[in-house]
Amino acid sequence: MIKVEKRNDVSRSIYFLTPVLAIFLTLFGGGIIFFILGFNPIEALKFFFITPISDLYGLSELLVKATPLCLIAIGLSFCFKSNNWNIGAEGQLIFGGIVGGGVALIFYNHDGFYVLPIIILSGAIGGMLFAMIPAILKTYFNTNEILVSLMLVYVAKLLLDYLVVGPWSNPEGFNFPETRQFSESARMPILFDGLRIHAGIFITLITVFLSWIILYKTYLGFQIKVSGLSLKTAKYAGFKGKTMIIIVFMISGACAGLAGVGEITGPIGQLHRNISPDYGFTAIIVAFLGRLNPIGIIFASLIVALTYLGAETAQIFLQVPKYTGQVFQGMILFFLLGSDYLLFFKIKFLGLKKNEL
Amino acid sequence: MNTKLKVSEISKIYPGCIANDKVSLEFGSGKIYALLGENGAGKSTLVKILSGVVKPDEGEVFLNNESVKLNSPLDAKKNNIGMVFQHFNLFETLSVFENLSIDSDKKDEELRGLVNDILKKYNFKIDLDIPVLNLSAGQKQKVEIIRCLIRNPKVLIMDEPTSVLTEQETDDLFISLKQFSKDGILIIYITHKLKEVLSLCDEVAVMRKGKVVSVSNTINEKIESLANKMVGENLNTIKKKINNFKNNEEILKISNLNFKSDDPYETNLNNLNLSLKKGECLGIAGISGNGQNELFQILSGEIITEGTSIMFRNKEIGKLNPRERREYLMAFSPEDRISQAAVPELKIYENVALNNFKSSNFFEKGLVNEKKIKEHSKKILSNFSVNTDNVELKSQFLSGGNLQKLIIGRELITSPELLVCFNPTWGLDVGAINYIHETLIQINEQGKSSILISTDNDELLKLSDRICVIYKGKLSKIMNADTVTAEKLGILMGGGSID
């Protein structure tokens, strides 16, 4: 007989240490996979996790990838903390990119300091409006936000496809599925010459700071916390449940929209079909690995960003497909959920009693 | 076919409660047996043992004089014991026939023939090929019954089957049950409704606090005698001094309030009327599940109604949510103290902040004023003798009694004009119960009013000035507490009526 019991008190330090344990288990599991594929596991892991960040360019790339991941994950933490399962951040990112990109195209032959802020703002609003669709359907029609937000990802993707192939495609672009390059004043300022790291990182850092204040120091944050722990209590305390659902989706969508607009005005510089390597989905892993805590999410975004880079170097040096990166992301989530289960539940092995034989 | 079922010296002990204490009963086919008792009397545990869901600590079950081991529901099925639970176990989106075929090993055509025979024999009208979600509660119950009948049961156990049925469906059910009984099936009928016992059953066993207190023929029983046995003798409790509130101002008035729920397991409230005077304690008795939950939520604002249906200090509050009602000096202590009144994972001071009203200044301009909340919490901990002074402690580490003191303290420290509490002392030890009772008496002495919804009759008789009973969502006449006896309460709680 095996019996599973809930643990009553989980110490806070262990709660934040288990993600670290999950990362070590992932390295170990990854080593085994490389070994089975016939590589020296230590060497392979070195290519995966050390080589990509052993020079300045690599570090800059790490931050370029971590910037959107962290931003989206922060937004998602508002939803997840209050028991709202928004898994459509990818769609909100793309829609934010579409709106921001559209505005950038309007201004493509304008110069001026005002261009970039307008684009960024419209991207955030785009993501926000797109996230409000599942929120409003959930509050007024009792739909399931998981399904609606997920399905809307494909709506946004196909809309982007249509736009870059059709009406928005570059008139001088030989029918490639992409828009014009944005004007210089529509681009995120580059921080260092020769590196791709851009001013979007400041947007992310400011958002992290604001989120920390909202989550831990405001009435809204308190309501989010209580609703996440017990909806019955939130109702009893008289919190306005519907309003709160819409607010957390708006925050989350705005963050994803910002991430989208950061990508197209930052490293990409135009709209095309693949403006995001699934950042919106990967950010779900980042949010949980960071324990839905703003500081935790910063560290988690760096680690998950590294799996993107590692996959690229591994592809070059070990000739393995770049999807190994997703294998590592999957393993992180798997080990995190596994150690969480053992963290919150005790498993007891009981001997068989006589009358059960 | 003659079936004899005997339970002998069955005991089942849960931590802190003896659910069955050496229960011995005998049943024979051809009769319908009632198992009567209040909530927590042990009848559910006994039927769970008979259906293999729960294993007894001691004692044996005999079927036709042979000892049977019922280690799982499968064993019960093998021994031809069928059980229809209060909550249905059906797949809503599958058709009726699919639901029946899931746990049957017969071929589809054979099963369909068998089911059609049963439908014809008992005159059930159910379309086998429509999804279960399109059925009424009564029809769903019939599907559950058919599922038992397929297996040729010797024993059929019905657990409070009428709680989700309409009057007409109840009559239909009784006709069917009598037919089954004629066909030789032994029927055990679990209920706390006295009328049903008298109109349906041949014998009645009454359980109280885990023990069988009486077994008798229903011909020899009346509603009053059963009520007395079910509720127990009137204990000599010290009643508080009952005051005459004739001249006091009316503080709360509910008129013609109706509530209809979409959830079939919730109770609808019909034409509710009550009024409460300043300084008065109104007790609401009843067996749980008769609408107490819904009534509490209507009072607290978790369920919103028409504005005019609830007047509090001459203001319409029916449309206000709980937080807005607190601004009008109402306070609420729900039944579920562990996951509703407080959140175990939150610290004490965070739980205190749940009772947030404007003048408390817990949240200024949307920001948390932690210092203020903590000061306020410290005051509650010392004023209401909670045995800690650490406001940073997570409330899961408080004992039930201390948690309840914290909750009552949180609600009362704002000096509300009305406190609504629902089973405030369930599961507490004697010391904590006394403390809570004294506190509740005290607030009445200070001229504040209270509504006490409780399933504990002793508590109601001790604390209330006036008492009424809620039964199937309807309130009885409100009586002065000094004219109320446990017997009267028992009759009303079981659905009977007194002059």
Image: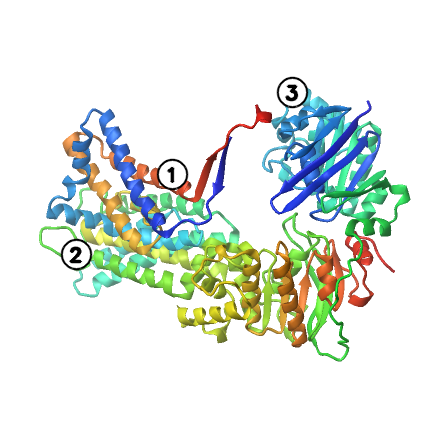
Q: Residue at x 75, y 25 (%)?
A: B117
Tell me which label, 2 or 1, sits earlier in the chain: 2
**Residue A356 sits in quarter:** top right
Q: In the image, what residue occupies the spot 74% across and 38% down?
A: B23
Tell me the crowding category of disc 1: few under 14, some 14 to 19, or many 20 or more residues within 10 angstroms, Cα based: few
The residue singled out by tag 2 in the image is A183
The C terminus of chain A is located in which quarter?
top right
Which type of secondary structure does the marked residue at label 2 adopt?
A: loop
**Residue at the disc numbered 3:** B106
Query: x%, y% of residue B244?
Result: 77, 76
Task: Give the spatial CA distance, label 3 vs label 2.
Answer: 74 Å
Q: Is residue A222 above or below residue A290?
A: below
Q: Residues within 10 Å of mark 2 (few under 14, many from 20)?
A: some
Which chain letter goes with mark 2?
Answer: A
| Residue B424 seen | no
Identify the subunit bearing mark 1: A
Which label lies toward us, 3 or 2? Answer: 3
Nearer to me, A214 or B229: B229
Q: Residue at x 64, y 30 (%)?
A: B73
B69 with respect to B34 (left or right):
left
On residue A338, the disc is 1
